[in-house]
Amino acid sequence: MLFIDWKPNKQSPVPLHRQIADFMKEKIANGEWTVGFKLPPQRTLAKIFAVNRSTVVAAYDELTAEGLIEGKSGSGTTVANNTWSLLASASPLDWKAYVNSGTHHPNLPTIQEINQAEFFPGIIRLGTGELAPELMANEAMQHVLRKLPSKVRTFGYEEPKGLYALRQGISAYLKTTGIHASPASVLIVSGALQALQLISIGLLHRGAAVLTEKPSYLQSLHVFQSAGIQLTGIPLDEEGMKVNLIPSYIKQHRPAFLYTIPSFHNPTGTLMTAKRRKQLLSICQKERLPIIEDDVYRELWFEKKPPEPLKTADETGLVLYLGSLSKTVSPGLRIGWLVGPEAVIDRLADIKMQTDYGSSTLSQWAAAEWLTGGLYEQHLNNVRMQLLHRRETALKALSSYFSNLATWKIPRGGFYVWLQLLPGISIKKLFDTALADGILLNPGNVYDQHADRYLRISYSYASPSDIEDGLRRLAGIVTTLLRAT
């Protein structure tokens, strides 16, 4: 993924295309963009530089004429040479071969494009799964940070499982959800995503299988796949994962774990019923199949609280429970937790110490203050109210503009509406056309390769006015694409 914090000076007498070409030459000459480096598509650079695509084309043509870049049909444009290697007899180091030989898989191309486009100026982010900046309680966070100097005694490394005061706070907080976990069975992680990575390399062997919902947030990442682990999806219905299918999937795939997001599932927004949760836990106990319960959206309910976590009824240590402040307070805090048997927590804490020596001390103290200082519940009440308003805005816009174009279910919490487009249009064409119009989408096929008629619509990030405007314009794009088919 490419981040560029430079833009051409539109007040300069130097033509824009020449400024862009010179900027790219400098990147190539300095070895930042090495031979074989793949350049962004022209329309992407045009967005980043805030210029017409023809300006970027002119810059590319100049660099091509000088032998610095080359374009190949179907594979994009890459750096072909640099100013040093044009004069040298020895061929340059092929960093691309090193990059391609890495064991961790790159993000899906669409995910890479999404991650980059999120920072385009003026973009309407209809798929982003995080709180809008105005919902992150910045004043409360400043209050928390001002209190830390009197509490933080050292900025050295914390113990392997994390700051004890934070683990105590999490233990007390979990009791309010019915989960009884001592601080010794809690591991602080840099967001729930790190917990998944630790599980993938610390508890699973290459070739192992993991059952998930279908579609699943896990499919949009390569955390498990990069560790040589196979993901197999079990379909959902309105009550959650179809747990009656689990025994046959176990017989066929012999999985090592089952991963689930029972509360306000990502990407579908589905809330697993209490009955279905009980059935899931019973089947997995009988089959001796451990469960990873990802509960990061739990507190984002609207009309009423979701059923108790699976972990609440876990009497045998079958469930590894994930929580986080990323969806409720701030993703930038990078604080989550993993709850499980002490032997598991000890193992994963040891691996975490080998990889990063522990999460940020400052972030851990801030999280402890959030959970123990009385701010968290007050903040959650406000976030729920704001998200409910945004959900209603999204549902009203969908009813106004998509009644003949798509179907959807009303989420009872979380961030997402799982939109099923009725007509058969190319999801890639829709993504590209919407992006060119300043609307960023999350296509369903990044969560399930067969979900090519779905969009994950998020109401958590875009403002209410942008949600309404974005969905109105998106409906127009869908209609136009339909007429062209």
Image: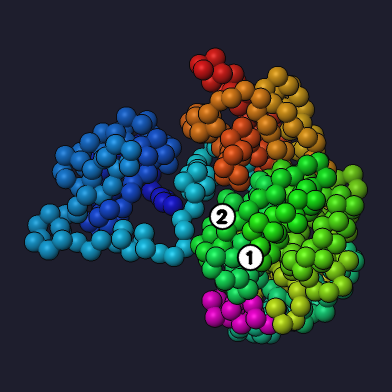
Would you say the residues marked 2 and 1 are in contact, meaning their CB atoms lie under 8 Å apart?
yes
- Tell me which label, 2 or 1, sits earlier in the chain: 1
Q: Can residue 481 be seen in this view?
A: yes
Quadrant of the image occupied by residue 168: bottom right
Q: Name the residue under label 1.
A: 196
- Report the span colored magenta: 345-359
Q: What distance separates the C-alpha of mark 2 from that of mark 1? A: 11 Å
Q: Which residue is drawn at 38% across and 48% down?
A: 6
Quadrant of the image occupied by residue 287: bottom right
Q: Would you say residue 356 sits in the magenta stretch?
A: yes
Q: Which residue is drawn at 16% across and 45% down?
A: 67
Q: Which residue is drawn at 8% across and 61% down?
A: 89
Q: Horizontal and vertical percent for residue 183? A: 79, 80
Seen from the viewer's position, the closer of residues 42 and 319 is 319
Relative height, residue 69 to residue 58 (above, below): below
Q: As shown in the figure, which amino acid type bears the numbered disc 1?
A: Leu
Main structural element of the magenta stretch: helix, strand or loop?
helix
Helix, strand or loop under label 1: helix
Q: Horizontal and vertical percent for residue 38? A: 33, 49
For this view, does 69 lie left or right of residue 292? left
Near mark 1 (Cα within 10 A), the count class, few <14, some 14-19 or many ≥20, is many
Q: Horizontal and vertical percent for residue 118? A: 54, 44
Q: Mark 2 points at which residue?
A: 221
Near mark 2 (Cα within 10 A), the count class, few <14, some 14-19 or many ≥20, is some
Q: Can residue 134 be seen in this view?
A: no
Helix, strand or loop under label 2: loop
Q: Horizontal and vertical percent for residue 413? A: 80, 46
Q: As shown in the figure, which amino acid type bears the numbered disc 2?
A: Leu
Q: How is this picture coloured?
A: rainbow
Relative height, residue 384 to residue 196 (above, below): above
Relative height, residue 419 to residue 236 (above, below): above
